[in-house]
Amino acid sequence: MNFHRLLALGLAFPLSVAFAAGKHVHGEGRLDAVIDKETITLNLELPLDAAVGFERPPRNDKEKAALAATDKTLKEAAALFVPTPAARCTVQSVQAQVPFTGGDDKHGEHGHEGETHHADIEASYVFRCAEPAALKGIETALFKHFKRLYRLETQRSGPSGQGAQRLTPKVPVLTW
């Protein structure tokens, strides 16, 4: 599924207006899930602070290592997201952009002159399921890896309709 189709599907969500404002809350991320036949596309946005405890260029080797570890963790899709096992889903692609790890270091930063800048992690995951009818949910291990993350606001669209759900460390499963 290409980005434009995903965006069009995302605009169908009733809560998309709330997220369109670019709300940045420390400890709170956003996860959008689109289920299209045998394909699951997940788009994740997290404040960098939720992953590493800061939102600026690293100041020392310890902070550089924290950014590198976060980048590595985010690229391990099968460990971060577990669709219903009976659906037999496999990872097809992963894209993760962690600010200050190289490339476009301004990616994900928000702010205006004189204001504090915020940096966001953005990641996209695509899974393909051999038994899509068995897909009933997706469990995430994000809370186990990122202890400063306390909430994920989710939106989903798929064959069973649309919905929104709040995930927390105690409720880490998106269900439908």
Image: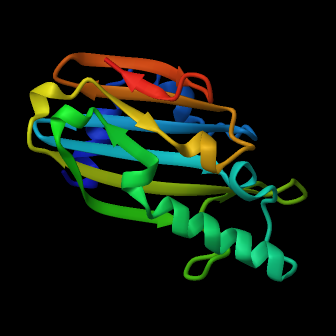
The picture quadrant where one finds residue 139 is top left
Q: Is 59 left, or right, of 52 in this rendering? A: right
Q: x%, y% of residue 169?
A: 62, 30
Q: x%, y% of residue 90?
A: 22, 52
Q: Name the residue: 36% across, 41% down.
A: 82
Give the answer, above or below, for where 24 lies relative to 92: above
Q: Is 172 left, or right, of 56 in this rendering? A: left
Q: Which residue lies furthest to the front in this view?
A: 85
Q: Name the residue: 67% across, 74% down.
A: 100
Give the answer, above or below, for where 30 lies relative to 160: below
Q: x%, y% of residue 146?
A: 66, 48
The picture quadrant where one finds residue 119 is bottom right
Give the answer, above or below, for where 24 lies relative to 100: above
Q: Name the residue: 61% across, 60% down.
A: 108
Q: Is 123 left, or right, of 2 in this rendering? A: right
Q: Is 132 left, or right, of 140 in this rendering? A: left
